[in-house]
């Protein structure tokens, strides 16, 4: 009988200790809140910011800002400080590498719903992610809905996550003690300094394929699909927030991308038609702006600006921001047809012979 009392007391003690430890761990994660799920950053804490799909929603919900930088990986090298300087705003960055229009549109919409102060959105319009059904998402990308579904009952996936506790909380404590400053929106997801540039790194992505000789145009089915996707995941937000200025841009992929992914396949006409359609849809709204840089051929044809077929240097990222701020390379209802005619003419007749597979 006495043994039973001892074991019962022991069990109660163990359960109590376990409960207290669980409460302490959950409270520590909630207080530091490395994914900004509950609140803005704790002043003086050195936050590790390197996980966009887990941190973006908290950033857009709990930070103070009036401008949003979003899009795919081609927007990751934008510096928020430069955006702030050029546009007179206070910006945050919430990008989605490999994100299709649905995911980015949803993230953009949530930010607009969270924050009534937003007056500027800068976003990439990658055509590789546009020609899909309305609800299509990247199946390989994380989708942590528990961080933005407003359901506290599933927050244990965040509060009691080993990676969150040891990498982001304990790691942040170590950085704070060591005097390492918190990451910021210049460095958040930026990779410009980590990837070497030039032909030696770009040309291995070029495929060894013969030119098809075809001339491919958009089909009616593709036109309908693209229109539906753009209206649901791109221009719906423009229409819903007429006081916000939306600066959307076609990212300037390099000449080797034009060759291996379009020229040899014969679908440059289709690509031009797709960009024209997207432009027409955005320019239906006075607060919608479209920028395109394919006429800047000095940039496009210089492989020293690129780390692969699509990703460009930090300097090119700065150039894009400066151009948008000054109105350069902006498409309007008066010039976009002529602009795309010239772009198609250039890339259909460019001499690609120097682009060789290593």
Image (cartoon, rainbow, N blue to C red):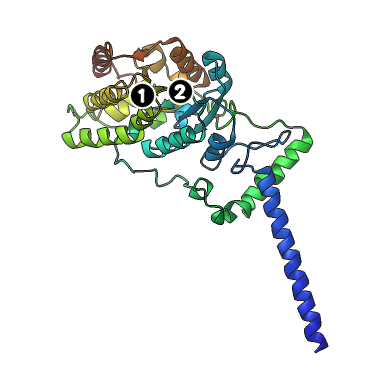
Which mark identifies residue 256?
1
**Residue at 70% over, 57% down:** 23
Quadrant occupied by the N terminus: bottom right
Left or right: 334 as drawn, with respect to 82:
left
Mark 2 or 1, nearer chain start: 1
Looking at the picture, tell me which residue is in the foreground, 69 or 40: 40
The residues bearing labels 2 and 1 have C-alpha atoms spaced at a distance of 10 Å
Which percent across, then down, holds residue 3? 81, 86
Q: Going 62% across and 29% down the picture, which residue do you hit? A: 184
Nearest the camera: 289 or 165?
A: 289
| Residue 182 place in picture, x, y as percent | 68, 32
The answer to whether 27 appears left or right of 323 in the picture is right
Q: Position of residue 147 (x, y in %)?
A: 53, 47
Label ID, residue 306: 2
| Residue closest to the eye, 108 or 80 | 108
Quadrant including the C terminus: top left
Q: Classify 10 Å Cα crowding around label 1: few (below 14), some (14-19), many (20 and above).
A: many
For residue 346, above or below residue 263: above
- The relative height of residue 53 versus residue 124 in the rendered view (above or below) is below
Which residue is at 35% across, 28% downward?
239
**Res 306 quadrant in image:** top left
């Amino acid at each position: 009988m006495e043994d039973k009392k001892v074991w019962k007391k022991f069990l109660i003690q163990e359960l109590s200790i376990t409960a207290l430890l669980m409460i302490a761990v959950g409270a520590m994660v909630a207080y530091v809140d490395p994914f900004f799920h509950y609140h803005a950053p704790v002043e003086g804490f050195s936050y590790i910011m390197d996980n966009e799909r887990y941190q973006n929603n908290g950033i857009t919900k709990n930070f103070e800002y009036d401008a949003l930088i979003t899009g795919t990986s081609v927007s990751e090298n934008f510096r928020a400080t430069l955006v702030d300087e050029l546009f007179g705003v206070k910006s945050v960055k919430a990008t989605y590498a490999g994100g299709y229009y649905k995911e980015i549109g949803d993230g953009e919409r949530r930010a607009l719903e969270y924050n009534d102060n937003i007056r500027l959105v800068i976003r990439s319009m990658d055509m590789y992610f546009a020609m899909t059904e309305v609800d299509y998402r990247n199946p390989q990308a994380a989708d942590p809905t528990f961080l933005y579904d407003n359901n506290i009952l599933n927050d244990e996936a965040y509060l009691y996550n080993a990676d969150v506790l040891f990498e982001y909380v304990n790691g942040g404590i170590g950085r704070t003690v060591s005097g390492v400053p918190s990451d910021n929106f210049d460095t958040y997801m930026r990779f410009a300094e980590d990837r070497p540039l030039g032909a030696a790194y770009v040309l291995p992505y070029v495929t060894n394929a013969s030119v098809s000789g075809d001339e491919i145009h958009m089909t009616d089915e593709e036109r309908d699909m693209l229109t539906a996707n753009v209206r649901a995941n791109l221009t719906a937000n423009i229409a819903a927030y007429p006081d916000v200025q939306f600066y959307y841009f076609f990212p300037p992929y390099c000449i080797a991308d034009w060759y291996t992914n379009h020229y040899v396949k014969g679908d440059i006409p289709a690509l031009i038609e797709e960009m024209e359609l997207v432009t027409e849809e955005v320019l239906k709204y006075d607060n919608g702006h479209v920028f395109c840089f394919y006429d800047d051929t000095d940039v496009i044809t210089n492989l020293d600006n690129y780390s692969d077929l699509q990703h460009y240097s930090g300097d090119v990222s700065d150039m894009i921001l400066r151009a948008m701020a000054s109105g350069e390379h902006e498409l309007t209802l008066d010039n976009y047809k002529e602009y795309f005619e010239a772009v198609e003419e250039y890339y259909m007749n460019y001499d690609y012979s120097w682009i060789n597979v290593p």
